[in-house]
Image: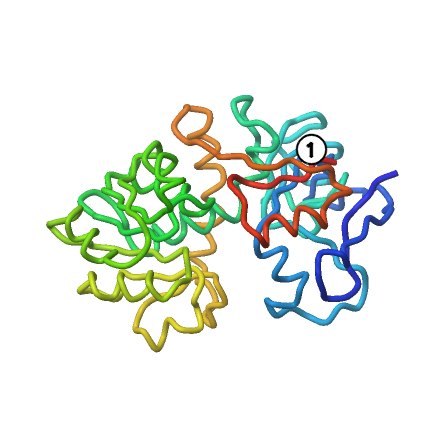
């Protein structure tokens, strides 16, 4: 029987339940996908707990937006896909499931070089990184200071910025420094004296900064090093951005994304899938858990873990 993970009240991971669902029939413009892997994102846990505001719950609310699988049905008016195609999807509602119907504009062909778990890992992290870099016009000649370089968003941002001709300095722990270095960035340790260490690594100065850590240190260091606050962005402390005179994307930002920024997020997944196919983009995978263990997956994402967590139906 098709199954989906849902919750009927805000709370801890224990509110997640597996529900039997009818196998959906894809309406016009949509694809029915048999899910092979669903990506677990921190925002999923924030929405479930109520930490990130959302509408009142009036019926079981399904979880997850990113995944990968195989086309199991094609709705009227959809061209370019057929049953059996391997695909990646993002921006959906209810990816933690055995089956999901998704608007065809949110679905992309998955090359053989990308596993289902790798495809499921892309949506939010890659979309956030790509859109942020584009919004800040990161490119050749830039020196990017990236806070939290070893996380999923950080790793995507490093690889894209390096491919686009930028020099990247990324904060990280000593334990994760080799991961950052392997992606093409220069690692720098968190902690007292961070601004001085960055100055030593970038004697010509930093030209753009992205905060994916959300710490006071990350924000204060970026502001201290950057003459142009318009090229500083936080992905975590959105509510503080205006007072600091910096930009914010995601992370509770009170400002909605512009149509152009939304278009960049949509563009990100097929761009990165092509890079994976060419052997030019790496995805660090973490724990794989059965779909029925979604609650444990949320405990892990709230504690923090190396690599992307995925659920396998």
Residue at figure coordinates x 65%, y 51% from the top left: 298
Instruction: Decide: is 111 above or below 242.
Output: above
Task: Provide residue 128's location: percent of width, then percent of height.
Answer: 45, 51
Task: Provide residue 248's location: percent of width, then percent of height.
Answer: 39, 65
Q: Nearer the viewer, residue 238 or 264?
A: 238
Q: In the rendered image, which residue does mark 1 sit on? A: 36
Task: Provide residue 201's location: percent of width, then percent of height.
Answer: 17, 46
Residue at figure coordinates x 51%, y 41% from the top left: 306
Callout 1: SS: strand
Q: Nearer the viewer, residue 19 or 216?
A: 216
- Dividing the picture into quarters, in which one does residue 308 lie? top right
10 Å crowding of disc 1: few (<14), some (14-19), many (20+)? many
Task: Name the image quarter holding the N terminus.
Answer: top right
The single residue placed furthest to the top in the displayed view is: 112
Task: Provide residue 65's location: percent of width, then percent of height.
Answer: 63, 49
Task: Name the image quarter holding the C terminus.
Answer: top right
Instruction: Decide: is 71 above or below 89.
Output: above
The single residue placed furthest to the left in the displayed view is: 204
Residue at figure coordinates x 76%, y 68% from the top left: 57
Residue at figure coordinates x 82%, y 48% from the top left: 18
Instruction: Decide: is 237 above or below 20.
Output: below
Q: Is residue 295 left or right of residue 194?
A: right
Q: Nearer the viewer, residue 180 or 230?
A: 180
């Amino acid at each position: 029987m098709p199954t989906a993970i849902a919750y009927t009240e805000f709370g801890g991971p224990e509110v997640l339940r597996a529900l039997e669902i009818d196998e959906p029939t894809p309406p016009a413009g949509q694809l029915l996908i048999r899910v092979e892997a669903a990506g677990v994102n921190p925002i999923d846990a924030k929405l479930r707990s109520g930490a990130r505001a959302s509408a009142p719950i009036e019926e079981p609310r399904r979880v997850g937006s990113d995944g990968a699988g195989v086309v199991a049905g094609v709705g009227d008016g959809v061209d370019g896909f057929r049953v059996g195609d391997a695909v990646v999807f993002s921006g959906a509602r209810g990816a933690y499931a055995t089956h999901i119907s998704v608007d065809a504009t949110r679905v992309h062909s998955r090359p053989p070089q990308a596993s289902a778990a790798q495809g499921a890992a892309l949506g939010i992290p890659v979309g956030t990184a790509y859109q942020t870099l584009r919004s800040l016009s990161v490119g050749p000649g830039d020196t990017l200071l990236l806070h939290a370089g070893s996380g999923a968003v950080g790793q995507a941002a490093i690889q894209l910025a390096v491919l686009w001709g930028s020099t990247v300095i990324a904060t990280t722990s000593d334990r994760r420094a080799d991961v950052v270095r392997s992606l093409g960035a220069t690692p720098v340790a968190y902690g007292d004296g961070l601004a001085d260490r960055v100055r030593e690594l970038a004697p010509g100065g930093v030209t753009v900064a992205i905060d994916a850590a959300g710490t006071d240190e990350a924000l204060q260091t970026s502001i201290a090093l950057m003459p142009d606050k318009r090229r500083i962005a936080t992905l975590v402390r959105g509510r503080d951005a205006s007072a600091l005179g910096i930009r914010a994307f995601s992370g509770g930002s009170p400002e909605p994304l512009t149509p152009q920024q939304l278009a960049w997020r949509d563009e990100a997944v097929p761009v990165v899938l092509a890079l994976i196919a060419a052997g030019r983009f790496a995805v660090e995978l973490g724990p794989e858990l059965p779909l029925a263990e979604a609650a444990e997956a949320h405990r892990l994402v709230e504690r923090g873990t190396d690599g992307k967590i995925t659920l396998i139906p």
